[in-house]
Image (cartoon, grey):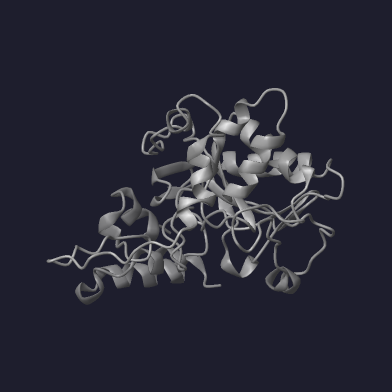
Amino acid sequence: MLKPLVLCLGVAASLAAPARAEQLARTLFGAVDAPAGKTSEAIGFYSKGCASGMAELPETGPTWQAMRLSRNRNWGQPEMISFLQDLSRFAATLPGWQGLYIGDISQPRGGPMTSGHASHQIGLDADIWMLPPKSLRLSRSEREKISSISVRTEDQRNINRNWTAQHMELLKAAASDPRVDRVFVTAPAKIEMCKTARGNRDWLQKVRPIYGHNYHFHVRLKCPKGDRACETQKPTVAQLSKGGDGCDKTLEWWVTDYLKPQPAPKKPKKPAPVKKSAKTYTLADLPNQCRNLVIAR
């Protein structure tokens, strides 16, 4: 890794050069290997922002391990780091689980990731592997090679044999936490939980189906109190589910109509403007505070 001072001087130089004024934000934020700012703050939206005062999830703890350390994405808002440690302690009480394997959280200063990962930009998103940890003593090398497991069949319609009652208890614990805004997971997993959940089902409202997310589930926290620059996600989960638990026809759509072959779109008379994304954002597309943050020493 580059030393922060040398690295920041390099970033600043690239911003100063007119020919590179539109350098991709993911390149700039991905090059920084240390946080900046004494006060933690989530700036902007989950998929379009940055973060100051980020905390590092220790690479290994009593009930967790951060995975893919070469990516340097085990940084988050203090609330996220505390949440992950709390959830890992709960996971360690489940049969067959020693804790959690934790994937991407965020980069040291947030921002778009070099891989173009859409969200995870303000330190309030985290990916948690579906693989029950059998060991929390994996080396750095082993953490690069090991893979998680899928809990969904290849046809994307059902859970497979990897799904267990412990997975449901883990997702329930995550969704029941008041710090959590929503939890994203593959649709077959939510369908199964809708079938088997007993007692209070309020927590199911926060569990949102989405494509992919069969090797991990994605936890998104609410904006921390006092972070005025943090943008709350809308619509809320209550609005999305119309006050219910989301176990309705809109959920079944993910394993029916969503999977049907779609007709080729008609060629428009005029090409539609290319929509910007995390892969193509420049600093001009992010909140103003992000420009100073990425070059801060």
Q: Is residue 283 above or below residue 145?
A: above
Measured from the top left, where is residue 136 in percent x and y?
81, 58
Q: Which of these two is toward me, 115 or 204? A: 204
Image quadrant containing the N terminus: bottom right
Q: Is residue 35 above or below residue 53?
A: below
Going by the picture, which residue comes out furthest to the left? 269
Left or right, residue 160 beside residue 267: right
Q: Which of these two is toward me, 231 or 213? A: 213
Image quadrant containing the C terminus: bottom left
Q: Is residue 39 at all visible to an observer of this figure?
A: no
What residue is rendered at 66% in x and 57% in y? 152
Q: Quadrant of residue 151?
A: bottom right
Q: Is residue 62 at all visible to an observer of this figure?
A: yes
Q: Is residue 28 above or below residue 208?
A: below
Measured from the top left, where is residue 144 in percent x and y?
68, 71
Measured from the top left, where is residue 242 in percent x and y?
45, 27
Q: Is residue 193 above or below residue 26?
A: above
Left or right, residue 22 beside residue 59: left
Going by the picture, which residue comes out furthest to the right? 95
What residue is rendered at 44% in x and 30% in y? 226
Measured from the top left, where is residue 128 in percent x and y?
65, 52
Left or right, residue 264 beside residue 58: left
Q: How many marks?
A: 0
What residue is rendered at 52% in x and 26% in y? 244
